[in-house]
Image: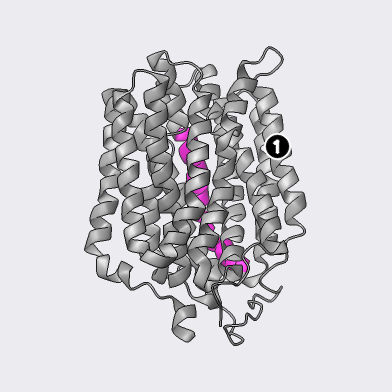
Amino acid sequence: MASKTDPIWTHSFSLLCLAQFLGYSHNAMLTPTLPLYITHLGGSPFLVGLTLASFSVTSVLLRPSIGHWADSWSDAGVMVLGVLLLGLSVLLWLIPSIEVIMGANAIRGIAWAGLNTGGYCLLANTAPPTRRGEASGYYTGVQSGPTLLIPAVALWLVDAPWGGFRVVILTAAVLALSGAIFGLFVKPSTTPHGTPQPSPERSPVTPPRATFLDHGVLMATVLLLCVTLPNTAASGFLVLYARNLGVENVGWYFVVSGCTSLLVRPLLGRISDRVGRAQTIVVGLLLQITGLMIFPLASSLGVIIVAGAFYAAGAAVGTAATMALAIDLSDPERRGVAMATFSTAFPMGHGLGALVAGSAIELVGYTGMFVTIATLVSGGLVFAFVNWSMLATNAGPDEKKR
């Protein structure tokens, strides 16, 4: 039986977090620079949204199969191959063609699915059941850590006399390839035959069924989709918004948002273990909506930073709480499929958010874009309240067996 004192920061968990940190650093280099790169090559905001969506489409479509592969082969192996492909595919961006960049971004979507599906499966199988919220907070905090400085560094590199987009692309490739190296030392939680390694609170399990969707985590998946919808608007398009307002030094926005996210995730992840996932998720959505509604009022860097702090806190709370909820509800025998199903919400939210944001900018401007996205996120609140009784009773298979 797991206890409150079961360790989280094991050797394997630490290496897992390091590999994730480097993989997410790769992405943090590209998030604010891709919109600038596409517009530099003559593309419109709609083409920016389409390029971002190409990343999400492949990540969503192939993630269920990748989750089954994590169960039947190796979750650590899937993660390593994913981060390796991230580093190799971004090198295609060195070809200054919007069509090539869009295709390379689609390949990156497949790689991103591997990095995240393998990583979430490892987290689900190694986190102490009674400390899942806290472990998810640390894990997502590590993933969000690169947003503390990396986007600002990327923007600085773009404008540096000796820098430019090529320097950013090469740096992003090195970060991802470094993550693949550290990932090689992460101990898999599944054997080559797909059977999860025994854990203290469970008896040996039967091999996973050959299905590619876990219906048990769909509620958590829908909630995460609502949490992730605004990400592109509050990151990539935020850079274009600031330049449209004539606001400089927008890199500080990413620094403050990153600090907020990094500090909030472990704390409120621990609180969700005590007060419940439902209450924590609702608080996260409310904070996001508040931040999104402040963005249209911005006329200076200070207001943008305040809006970003509210938004980042809400995204941090919502991501950690929904992830812990998904682990609670997942079948321990099919963690790869369960976490693949859950994590499709990340690329789906990013892709849908990118398309909505890019289209809204051209139709109603940046102010209308933020209001539109905030309205969509409000749907998450409605969904949470409609399913409140199910959210409040979220004991997963592990707890039921103990």
Q: Quadrant of the N terminus?
A: bottom right
Q: Is residue 103 visible in the rendered structure shown here?
A: no
For the record, the magenta segment spans 50-70
Using the image, determine if residue 22 lies above or below residue 101: below
Q: Residue at position x 67%, y 49% from top?
A: 83
Horizontal and vertical percent position of residue 185: 77, 59
Q: Nearer the viewer, residue 267 or 243?
A: 267
Q: On the image, numbered disc 1 is attached to which residue?
A: 173
Left or right: 27 in relation to 80: left
Chief secondary structure of the magenta portion:
helix
Q: Is residue 391 visible?
A: yes
| In front of the other: 314 or 102 | 314
* Marker count (numbered): 1
* Along the viewing direction, whichever of 316 and 231 lies nearer the viewer: 316
Magenta residue check for 60: yes
Q: Can you tell which quarter of the image residue 222 is in?
A: bottom left
Write the residue at 61% across / 60% down: 118
Q: Residue at x 64, y 78 (%)?
A: 195
Residue 15: which quarter of the image? bottom right
Where residue 216 appears, x then y in whole percent?
Answer: 40, 71
Q: Is residue 368 left or right of residue 329?
A: left
21 to the left or right of 4: right
Q: Position of residue 122 (x, y in %)?
A: 61, 64
